[in-house]
Image (tube, rainbow, N blue to C red):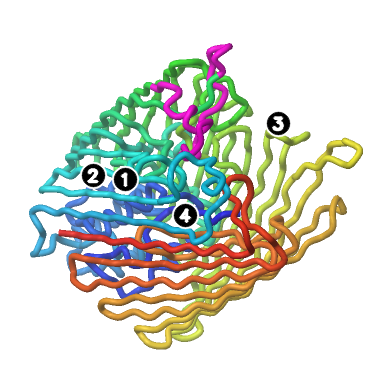
């Protein structure tokens, strides 16, 4: 499996304007999600360079941070405004933020305006990626374009105005601007206007959400209390799940603790997909964003889409908020597809009603949604905070035919459709230096999912202990098991299902030898049981890494060894890379993977980054499959990036 570029957030050396002492990588690993240059990655990066000023900010601005609810955001800003003597650490402790949330908050906010604020700014990034071994698509001329991989972005602003353009090219695509996006934005504390490309979030995300949401992991509380952050410029190079047109957001004060927020947007864009010209219908929408061959290019911009969105949210008091959303979709041709992630039909309106109640120690969220076909969805979440403990409960239900192409479901399946589940999370920080977290998620599909012969059911359980043995040394222990329905077809053609169980144990030690040098070592074992449908599998992955940083340099290296019976027992290992890119490759088979990462900042206005990665597997003659296949048992990849800020 090829390396998956992740998402959710910012790379290890993105902070050009304010380098912090707390390591960023552990926080990113906790909240990252598999993606390719995810939209929130770029949002975090933007606010790292242009911090939010807490004492004059709109609370909704903080909602891009994972797990920061609107109630938490209001409390953070209220403390910053009313108690100027409090430090950011004291504010975070008062709101009971986790370490990962605090690290990101520290990099993206300031308590007050710095004295040397620039009246105007301009930044430029260029990144190129080169694989030493050419893949089959290039060698066989199946791809029309060259092997060059190129990403470019320029952004700038004056006062409350900002604008940006992003262009990218994947290997095999024809031009250096094969994909382009751009935006122009005006914003202040009560008004925002975005022209061009943008994303939107509403309520708990059942009908309007950006492309990637929180995942199950070490952040056991945050995923079920996430609330929509309104509209944002689109700064990513992902070629789907964004709008193109105009969006406006306005906050109207009503009383001291009451306000009305109105969001409206219009989008007209062409989506890529497959068209059945005989029946004049679209049979699928393309989300790969790759246009390298004649067949792929034929799918490009094949289907017109027009969207009108409206969101109204009334903050009644400090405790109560209610809101409503409506999304009108119209396509050039009807969509006839069994995929749960696309619209069904040609036009219709999706709606939702949501509400939130918060007190000093509790938060309750609920959302009822209805799609264009009259199918229903429901989300309900609760969070309770004690002196040293947090607990959360999340309930979700989406009917089998529910279709919400811009919605997101926190659960086993990201599309809000055909799933019922109950999630519980617990976080305890009692003894000095000791944190315990755990979650249990029970879920079931209402009807059989695609390729299955009975409804999917499962139980996903995680427990983790993070123990700071001494000030510079931390140990992490994790137990994770998931029992989930899987399908099979026997040699005589009989089809059926069974329950597959995957259990893993992880032990890790992080040590900061000096303020400049830190190391990390991990061992993880996995065991897969297939209920006698096939032989049991085991796997082991281990790695060691070291990091050194100075005022201008940051250098890191890792070597990992892995041995698993097949992809079924693969393990994913988070990898930092150059600014704006994170990796989460699946390691399976037998072999080794290593990387070295360098970031150099010769002057404040210039940052250079380079990443060299090698993956080698034993007893194989090629890696990958199809047009992505490369000859030999090793893949070498080099990334170079330059950032200029003025």
* Residue beneath disc 4: 6
Task: Give the CA separation, mark 3 to mark 2.
Answer: 44 Å
Task: Give the CA separation, mark 4 to mark 2.
Answer: 22 Å
- Considering depth in this image, is 382 or 447 the residue closer to the camera? 447
What secondary structure is found at the residue carrying circle 2? strand
Q: Please tell me which of labels 4 and 1 falls first in the chain.
A: 4
* Residue beneath disc 2: 164
Q: Please tell me which of labels 1 and 2 falls first in the chain.
A: 2
Residue 413 in the figure: left or right of residue 41 = right
Q: Looking at the image, can residue 525 be seen?
A: no
Q: Cβ–Cβ below 8 Å for labels 4 and 2?
A: no
- Considering depth in this image, is 629 or 51 the residue closer to the camera? 629
Task: Give the CA separation, mark 3 to mark 1.
Answer: 37 Å
Tag 3: Cα neighbours inside 10 Å, few (<14), some, or many (≥20)? some
Q: Is residue 279 magenta?
A: yes
Magenta range? 276-305
Tag 4: Cα neighbours inside 10 Å, few (<14), some, or many (≥20)? many
Task: Please tell me whether mark 3 or mark 2 is closer to you in this view.
Answer: 2
Q: Quadrant of the N terminus?
A: bottom right
């Amino acid at each position: 499996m090829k390396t998956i570029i992740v998402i959710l957030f910012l790379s290890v050396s993105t902070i050009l304007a304010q380098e912090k002492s707390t390591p960023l990588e552990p926080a990113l690993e906790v909240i990252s999600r598999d993606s390719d240059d995810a939209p929130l990655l770029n949002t975090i990066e933007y606010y790292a360079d242009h911090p939010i000023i807490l004492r004059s900010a709109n609370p909704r601005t903080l909602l891009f941070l994972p797990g920061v609810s609107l109630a938490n955001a209001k409390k953070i800003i209220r403390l910053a405004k009313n108690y100027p003597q409090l430090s950011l650490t004291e504010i975070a402790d008062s709101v009971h933020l986790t370490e990962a949330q605090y690290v990101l908050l520290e990099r993206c906010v300031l308590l007050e305006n710095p004295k040397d604020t620039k009246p105007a700014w301009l930044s430029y990034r260029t990144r190129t990626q080169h694989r030493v071994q050419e893949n089959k698509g290039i060698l066989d001329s199946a791809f029309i374009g060259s092997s060059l991989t190129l990403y470019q972005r320029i952004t700038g602003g004056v006062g409350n105005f900002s604008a940006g353009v992003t262009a990218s090219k994947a290997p095999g695509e024809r031009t250096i601007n094969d994909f382009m996006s751009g935006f122009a934005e005006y914003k202040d504390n009560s008004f925002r206007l975005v022209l061009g490309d943008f994303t939107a979030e509403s309520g708990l995300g059942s009908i309007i959400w950006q492309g990637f949401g929180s995942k199950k992991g070490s952040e056991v509380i945050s995923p079920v209390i996430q609330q929509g952050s309104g509209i944002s410029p689109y700064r990513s190079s992902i070629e789907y799940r964004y709008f193109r047109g105009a969006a406006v957001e306005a906050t109207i004060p009503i009383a001291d603790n009451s306000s009305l927020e109105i969001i409206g947007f219009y989008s007209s864009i062409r989506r890529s997909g497959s068209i059945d010209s005989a029946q004049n219908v679209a049979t699928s929408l393309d989300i790969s964003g790759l246009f390298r061959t004649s067949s792929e290019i034929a799918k490009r911009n094949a289907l017109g889409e027009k969207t009108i969105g409206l969101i109204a949210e009334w903050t009644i008091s400090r405790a109560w908020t209610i809101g409503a959303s409506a999304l009108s979709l119209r396509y050039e041709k009807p969509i006839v597809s069994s995929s749960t992630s696309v619209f069904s039909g040609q036009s219709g309106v999706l709606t939702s009603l949501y509400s939130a109640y918060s007190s000093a120690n509790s938060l309750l969220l609920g959302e009822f949604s209805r799609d264009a076909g009259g199918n229903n969805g429901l989300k309900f979440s609760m969070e309770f905070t004690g002196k040293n403990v947090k607990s959360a409960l999340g309930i979700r239900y989406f009917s089998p035919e529910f279709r919400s192409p811009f919605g997101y479901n926190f659960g086993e399946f990201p599309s809000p459709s055909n799933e019922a589940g109950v999630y519980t999370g617990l976080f305890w920080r009692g003894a000095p230096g000791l944190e315990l977290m755990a979650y249990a998620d029970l879920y079931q599909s209402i009807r059989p999912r695609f390729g299955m012969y009975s409804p999917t059911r499962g139980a996903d359980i995680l427990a983790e202990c993070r123990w700071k043995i001494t000030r510079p040394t931390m140990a992490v222990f994790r137990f994770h098991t998931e029992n989930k329905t899987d399908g099979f077809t026997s040699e005589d053609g009989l089809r059926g299902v069974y329950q597959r169980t995957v259990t893993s144990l992880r032990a890790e030690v992080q040590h900061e030898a000096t303020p400049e040098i830190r190391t990390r070592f991990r061992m993880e074992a996995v065991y897969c049981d297939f209920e006698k449908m096939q032989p049991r599998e085991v796997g082991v992955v281990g790695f060691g890494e070291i990091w050194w940083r100075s005022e201008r340099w940051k250098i890191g290296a890792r070597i990992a060894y892995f041995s698993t019976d097949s992809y079924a027992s693969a393990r994913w290992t988070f990898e930092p890379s150059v600014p704006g890119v994170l990796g989460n490759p699946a390691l399976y088979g037998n072999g080794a993977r290593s990387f070295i990462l360098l970031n150099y900042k010769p002057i404040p206005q210039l940052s250079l980054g380079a990443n060299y990665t090698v993956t080698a597997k034993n007893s194989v003659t090629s890696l990958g499959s199809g047009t992505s296949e490369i000859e030999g048992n090793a893949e070498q990849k080099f990334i170079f990036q330059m950032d200029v800020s003025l």
